[in-house]
Amino acid sequence: MNDDEILSEFRASEALLEGHFMLSSGRHSGHYLQCARVLMNPERAGRLAFALAQKIPREIRNEIDVVISPAMGGIIIGQEMGRALGKDAMFLERPDGEFHLRRGFRIDKGAKVLMVEDVVTTGLSSREAIAAVGREGGEVIAEVALVDRSNGAADLGVPFFPLVDITFPTYADDEIPDELAAIEVTKPGSRKD
Ligand SMILES: O=P(O)(O)OC[C@H]1O[C@H](OP(=O)(O)OP(=O)(O)O)[C@H](O)[C@@H]1O
Ligand SMILES: O=C(O)c1cc(=O)[nH]c(=O)[nH]1
Ligand SMILES: [Mg+2]
């Protein structure tokens, strides 16, 4: 799939939102990619996961033991990546602020993990999820995401293969342009702090 075909999947699913959003990192943006809308169609979700699997170099793909993703946004694309790669897929949750495996999920010591995200903006959530896998005894060998919003700048500490780069401006609290400040802010994600 080329970038235009991927972007048309986002447009077709009305996943490109405009307004005033507070992102997971606390930064503000006039744009939000609501990946849940892209993934609500199982056929489309499977197609995108298959395309994402092709982005992973073969030598890394062959090493993957298991797929892990951070809830909530990572769950559906993580499951579809598991299907595309023929591996089990688990997810991390943070009901108390720090990511953990719950629900009986566990990984073998030294297991090689593919981290799967829906969106990477600052990379903070990815780095937290990668650290959590280390605490659980695994080793993240690479990450994939549907969208890289960081303009290639996010440093995850592991090789990162996004399906598509879609970079929109983001702003700290004290940098919000007047036209954005005039719009009521919404926080679509589930991070609590
Ligand atoms: O790279 P970052 O700056 O960390 O931003 C990206 C993260 O933000 C969103 O999750 P969010 O915390 O909003 O929760 P959700 O997955 O439950 O929607 C998204 O699913 C990524 O996990
Ligand atoms: O940075 C985020 O929190 C974020 C941005 C975005 O466009 N979509 C999303 O799900 N999260
Ligand atoms: Mg998330």
Image (spheres, rainbow, N blue to C red):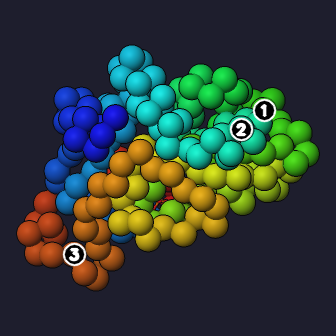
Q: Residue 55: x and y, percent?
A: 50, 43
Quick one: which residue is furthest to the bottom in this view?
A: 174
Which residue is under mark 2?
62
Give the x, y percent position of residue 49: 47, 31
Find numbered disc 3 in the image and state the secondary structure of the residue it sits on: loop
Q: Which is more foreground, mark 3 or mark 2?
A: 2
Nearer-N-terminus badge (3/2): 2
- Residue at 48 percent of width and 28 percent of height: 50
Q: Which mark is residue 176?
A: 3
Judge from the rendering whether residue 182 lies leftward or rightward of residue 30; answer left or right: left
Residue 142 at x, y percent in the picture = 64, 52
Question: Which element carries disc 2, helix, strand or loop?
Answer: loop
Determine whether, in the image, residue 50 is placed left or right of residue 95.
left
- Name which residue type carries label 2: Asn
Residue at the disc numbered 1: 105
Is ligand 2 closer than 8 angstroms to the Cβ of mark 3? no
The span from disc 3 to disc 2 (Cα, nearest Å) is: 45 Å
Please provide percent x and percent y for residue 1: 34, 35
Residue 153 visible in the displayed image: yes
Q: Residue at 70% of width from left, 27% of height from top? A: 87
Residue at image coords 81%, 49%: 138
Q: Identify the amino acid type marked 3.
A: Ile
The mark nearer the N terminus, 1 or 3, is 1
